[in-house]
Amino acid sequence: MYSAFLFPVLISTMSALVSSVSVSAQTITGTEDPVPSLDPTNQLATSTSELVNCNEFQSVVTLNESPLVTLEFVVNVPNTNSNYEFTEEELSAGGVMSALLSYDGEGYVSLASSIDGFMPNAEAIMCLPGGDVPVSKYLLGERSLDSQVAARPVEDSAQTLLNTDIIQTTGKTKCLFRKLLNEDGEIPINASDYNTFIWAVGASNSLSYHLARGSVSIPFEPCTPQGVGKVLALTQGGAYDQYWKAHGILMALAWGFFAPVAIASAICRRLIPGEGVWFKIHRAANVMSCVLTIAGFGLAVAAYNAAGIPHFGASHQRIGIVIFVIVLLQILNGMLRPHIPKPASDDVGKTAHSDEEGGEEFSNEKNPIRAPELNFSLRRSRAHTPNTEKTRSRFSWEIVHRSIGLALLGMGLYNGYTGLVLYAARTGNASDYANVWWGWTGAILGFALLYSIYDRCVTKK
């Protein structure tokens, strides 16, 4: 009865979901096998019985399409009147998750519980065909080509996986295990809510850099005699992926476009025609960079709050809060800038407004000439500009303003790069687009630097 009802629902649901969400679920009834079987014909067996057999897998989630990686599982907790028989160890842990991780390829497979969807401090179940201990627990570290840095086995006393097995046939790898829901010193598995996992598969049986990986947030539901509901698994970064994506877009615009443009406009002020146009561009770009930074920071904080993740636990987040604070100080610094004094005397006919904030104005005793009226030339140098003596406060402000601006740009560019790397690791994207990031920002700043060198060389002539 249940299989006849759910089959058309399953088909219609799968066709309606967006490509970033991989989901499939079935309610299972029927077999007498007391443990989940690796036999594909028994993994999702059904019958006409009205009571569900909680010794069978209840749900299957597609983690990846190519190569195909799937997770089949059932979660059992006490006091649900199911037909699952608990061991004392499973009762003490508040229940158990039984799972089968399948991979259309020959290589290792792994599934790790993670607080934030990233590798560091995630707790993995590694399935290494042919290994001394084929299925065991590992603690993950930073993303690295060195397997000793990326993952290390936990102590023997913490190796508590039950009913482990691994089977590898031509072109396929399957790993079976049972994991206690609550264990001392480990990330708990919530039997009635979303749980975040990261997964990976390798091109070989030994632990090495993964061939494919990703993050998924899966809602668990305890098995009952009436079955379980549909599984809506959120892939591509978990339940808060839209927060991270919006955060990345805002920060990329702030530090990959507006901040470089702001600095380039100041460096290339002589190249920009029109009185004070460079300053208007500089100010507008800085304002946009600040606004986008504040908005992007707010999105990141909101995502961490919603996910219940501790703030500022890694270098990317710590640099982010430093950038946010300094941006606020730089805004205040800009508002309090001392203006350049007017020329000491007008009676001799020499007036000049520095090109620091507006247009240049030149004059002789007879005919004042404004800078935009001059023929444009790259050879127009500071030597052609009548000097006004800057106050000590203005001179000090310029040093502080420029130093902070360059420091912010450096931190922003670096954090933009690490953000792309983190997002690629979270979503399983093959590329982190670092080359695009450095190529684009490098082109803007490289042009400004080359022009500055040229301008100074011409000025000295």
Image (cartoon, helix red, strand yellow):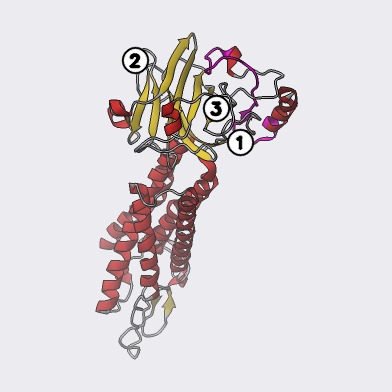
- Mark 2 or 3: in front is 3
Q: Quadrant of the C terminus?
A: bottom left
Q: Quadrant of residue 91?
A: top left
Q: Which amino acid, by three-letter code, is at mark 3?
A: Val
Q: Which residues are magenta?
A: 14-40
Rendering coords of residue 304 (x, y %)? 45, 50
Label 2 and label 3: CA atoms lie apart by 26 Å
Residue at left 34%, top 17%?
A: 133
Q: Which amino acid, by three-letter code, is at mark 1?
A: Leu
Tally of numbered discs:
3
Asked whether the viewer can see residue 237, the reply is no
Residue at left 33%, top 83%?
A: 343
Say what secondary structure mark 2 lies in. Answer: loop
- Towards the viewer: 385 or 318: 318
Q: Going by the image, does 190 lie left or right of 438?
A: right
The residue identified by callout 2 is 131
The residue identified by callout 3 is 74
Q: Quadrant of the N terminus?
A: top right
Say what secondary structure mark 1 lies in. Answer: loop
**Could you tell which of marks 2 and 1 lies nearer the N-terminus?**
2
Q: Going by the image, does 148 lie left or right of 69?
A: left
Magenta: main secondary structure = loop
Q: Residue furthest top?
A: 170
The residue identified by callout 1 is 232
Residue 26 among those drawn in magenta: yes
Say what secondary structure mark 3 lies in. Answer: strand
Rendering coords of residue 69 (x, y %)? 52, 23
**Could you tell which of marks 3 and 1 lies nearer the N-terminus?**
3
Q: Which amino acid, by three-letter code, is at mark 2?
A: Gly
Label 3 and label 1: CA atoms lie apart by 15 Å
